[in-house]
């Protein structure tokens, strides 16, 4: 039982009243909000990947992805995204220890990693739509591929904008060590985006 505070009641005299639990701090409420968003987003991505698997299994007309998709290019994209997660960890470490220079350097590297990923994905889409003749209207393989990768690309773009805002605030001196939890929350989102891409790369490109 929690500590009780005594109050004077005209009818019952002294009565114990439980103290209220402290409200969520900006740190914990921000993390809770992000985890809630990621949980909902995970179900959306999970449904998309499950739908891709359900449409593909035992479908004799399903094309061989290797005939259309460039595994080497996508492997490089995956490596870049994984490296950007590492730089995100270093950026968080920098601001947690009050090292603004380290934070700004590694956050900038994280942003560049996201931009490189988006640029390579745009190049891949241009190649698939132009030279390979793929189209979201052609068949189920094309539709599920562009929906999954496009939806993930939107998340990467959102993460790049998110991280850029934090980086600019750091450059302006408006992101002190006391607000390191803001970078930690952004890191949760970025690591989630990285994890989802690994799943998409495995199920769509490799299997």
Image (spheres, rainbow, N blue to C red):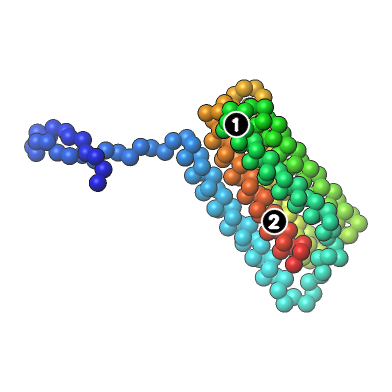
Residue reaching furthest to the right? 131
Judge from the rendering whether residue 72 lies leftward or rightward of residue 102; answer left or right. Answer: right
Q: Position of residue 194 (x, y in %)?
A: 67, 50
Residue 165 in sight in this render:
no
Q: Residues within 10 Å of mark 2 (few under 14, many from 20)?
A: some
Residue 125 vs 103, above or below: the answer is below
**Residue 23 location, quadrant:** top left
Report whether residue 17 is seen.
Answer: yes
Of badges 1 and 2, the one in the foreground is 1
Q: Could you tell me residue 131's position as x and y percent?
A: 91, 57
* Above-or-below relation of 154 to 91: below
Residue 185 percent across, percent down from the top left: 56, 40
Sequence order check: which comes first, mark 1 or mark 2? 1
The residues bearing labels 1 and 2 have C-alpha atoms spaced at a distance of 28 Å
Badge 2 marks a residue whose secondary structure is helix
Q: Which sits in the foreground, 141 or 192?
A: 192
| Pointer 2 residue | 198
Q: Residue at x 69, y 56 (%)?
A: 198
Image point (60%, 31%), residue name: 95
Q: Quadrant of residue 174?
A: top right
Residue ID for mark 1 = 95
Picture mark count: 2
Q: Which of these two is toward me, 95 or 206?
A: 95
Label 1 residue SS: helix
């Amino acid at each position: 039982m929690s500590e009780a505070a005594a109050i004077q009641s005209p009818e019952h005299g002294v009565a114990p009243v439980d103290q209220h639990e402290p409200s969520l701090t900006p740190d914990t409420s921000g993390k809770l909000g992000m985890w809630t968003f990621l949980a909902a987003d995970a179900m959306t991505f999970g449904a998309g990947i499950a739908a891709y698997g359900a449409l593909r299994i035992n479908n004799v007309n399903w094309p061989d992805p290797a005939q259309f998709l460039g595994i080497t290019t996508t492997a490089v994209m995956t490596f870049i995204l994984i490296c950007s997660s590492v730089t995100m960890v270093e950026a968080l470490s920098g601001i947690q220890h009050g090292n603004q220079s380290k934070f700004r350097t590694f956050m900038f590297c994280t942003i560049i990693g996201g931009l490189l990923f988006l640029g390579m994905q745009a190049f891949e889409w241009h190649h698939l739509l132009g030279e390979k003749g793929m189209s979201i209207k052609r068949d189920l393989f094309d539709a599920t591929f562009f929906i999954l990768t496009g939806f993930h690309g939107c998340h990467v773009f959102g993460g790049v904008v998110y991280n850029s805002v934090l980086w600019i605030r750091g450059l302006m001196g408006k992101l002190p060590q006391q607000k390191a939890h803001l970078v930690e929350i952004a890191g949760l989102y970025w690591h989630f985006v990285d994890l989802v891409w690994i799943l998409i790369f495995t199920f769509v490109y490799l299997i």
